[in-house]
Image (cartoon, helix red, strand yellow):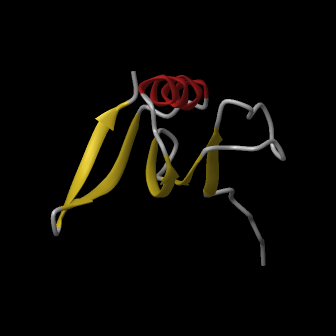
Amino acid sequence: MGVSIHPVTLQIRAGSQHESYGDPYDLAVDMQLLGKDRAYLSCARGTLTRAVYAEIGARLREMGIAAVEWERCSYGQTRLMKRVVR
């Protein structure tokens, strides 16, 4: 019998004083890897600015992530959102 362990769930943290784990953060987002180049984002809490959005995109590209998905809930409706990481 063999055993393998795969890191599938990660957490994104960002903030004006955040550089590494343990630093204060203003935004946290859970991320599940879907294969080698896709990710599903969930449980976002905090404020997502354009600058942080761009930096998260850059870090995802560095990891080899080409596309992300998430659900957007507003006004009683839930939509599946998909974006190419640029």
Residue 54, image x, y percentages: 47, 23
- Assign the N terminus to one quadrant of the image: bottom right
Q: Residue at x 23, y 55 (%)?
A: 80
- 65 or 29: which is nearer to us? 29
Q: Nearer the viewer, residue 3 or 53?
A: 53
- Measured as percent of width and height from the top left, residue 51 is found at 49, 22
Q: Going by the image, does 83 lie left or right of 5?
A: left
Q: Is residue 26 placed above or below 42 in the rendered structure? A: above
Please tell me how many numbered marks the rendered image carries. 0
Residue at image point 25% right, 48% down:
81
Image quadrant where residue 4 sits: bottom right
Instruction: In the displayed orientation, state which residue is furthest to the right.
Output: 22
Q: Quadrant of residue 68?
A: top left
Q: Position of residue 67 (x, y in %)?
A: 38, 37
**Residue 22 position in % (x across, y down):** 84, 47
- Seen as rendered, the residue at the extreme bottom is 1
